[in-house]
Amino acid sequence: MEYVAGRILTKNGFEKGYIGFKRKKIIEKGKTIPPEKPVAKGIICPLFINAHTHIGDSFVKEKNIKIPNNLQELVEPPNGLKFKLLKEANEQEIVDGMEKSIETMQKTGTKYFYDFREGGIRGICQLKAAIDLWKTQAFILSRPDEICYNKNEIDLLLKNSDGIGLSSISEWGYSEIKKIAKETRKKKKIFAIHASERVREDIDLILDLKPSFLVHMIKATKSDLKLVKENNIPIVVCPRSNNFFNLKIDLEFFKNSGLKIILGTDNAMINSPNIIDEITFIKKNYSCFTNEELLLMNTYNARKVLNHDSGILGLNQKADFIVLDEKTLMPLYISVC
């Protein structure tokens, strides 16, 4: 039996105690000191969810090129620099880059990540090849190869992925995107979309798509956000990415509005897909969140809104947890099944 000790994150906050585990299963829990010397002491919390990634562009980090911090110039489909580089890259280059990002996530405590997978069926196959041997699990939100609706393609994508993750309504014909959303819901899969990132977009049109979650919402008005809350739709925020593009998100207002907030790391060519870096960035730049709130955001709260299993850190459950340094939040020990 091995032990970890310190402050255990529960869905109601921190509790002092220890966890005993054997063969990747939690066997014992207590509120005193452990019977034996623990392998690590610190903050014990469930493994993270990274709710928004684009790891297909990870390979770009290896290239000696200047990445523009203009959102349209870099990532707007179909002519942004990112898409040009993806077309030029060979299969192995893309898969190798993805593997490096998956390794980073596993080494920093991410159990699940939601990847907006560009490139149609080819993009899905690349991610499945990259993740094959890792314990970190991907939810693949695929995307048509072109900015148009093709029923046969959408059927193929939905058959091979967990849903659809699109760019914004500003970049699509709305009737096309509505057909995709309807088809995705019909198959009972996830439909997610970037919204009001660079400019404000019509919230009524966005909500009419009945998204599972939205990404960004930086330029949304207060009344827009109120409607999102009333419709019980989570928002994934990526403040490091926003900062790269000189966009400022009012996280304090998001929090005070009672919105369901989850964290993502966005494009891997810009930021490492390390959710701890996202948390520490928020701690440094926003004074409105405690460590407890930030850790809950991407553990228990994320699992609840994204419908993951709720038996976390319980007896006879999988020993899926990370121990973090109390001061720096850096990983001290990771157990992943």
Image: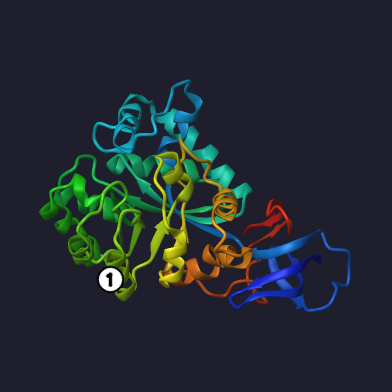
Give the amino acid at mark 1.
Leu
Q: Residue at x 14, y 57 (%)?
A: 179
* Residue 148 picture location, percent across and down: 15, 45
Query: What's the image's color scheme?
Result: rainbow
Q: Residue at x 29, y 36 (%)?
A: 72
* Residue 85 picture location, percent across and down: 35, 27
Q: Residue at x 13, y 53 (%)?
A: 174
* Residue 207 picture location, percent across and down: 23, 65
In this picture, residue 200 sits left or right of residue 329: left
Closest to the observer, 320 or 84: 84
Outermost residue toward the left in this view: 175
Outermost residue toward the right in this view: 36
In this rendering, the answer to whether 1 lies above or below 72 is below
Q: Residue at x 16, y 58 (%)?
A: 178
In this picture, residue 207 sits left or right of residue 263: left
User: Total of numbered circles in the picture?
Assistant: 1
Mark 1 Cα shell of 10 Å, populated few (<14), some (14-19), many (≥20): some
Asked if one can make out residue 230 in the rendered structure from this viewpoint, the answer is yes
In this picture, residue 320 sits left or right of residue 220: right
* Residue 160 picture location, percent across and down: 32, 52
In this rendering, the answer to whether 93 lies above or below 28 is above
Residue on which the image places disc 1: 227
Asked if one can make out residue 307 in the rendered structure from this viewpoint, the answer is no
Quarter of the rendering containing residue 326: bottom right
**Circle 1: element type:** helix
- Quarter containing the C terminus: bottom right
Closest to the observer, 258 or 141: 258
In this picture, residue 282 sits left or right of residue 89: right
- Quarter containing the N terminus: bottom right
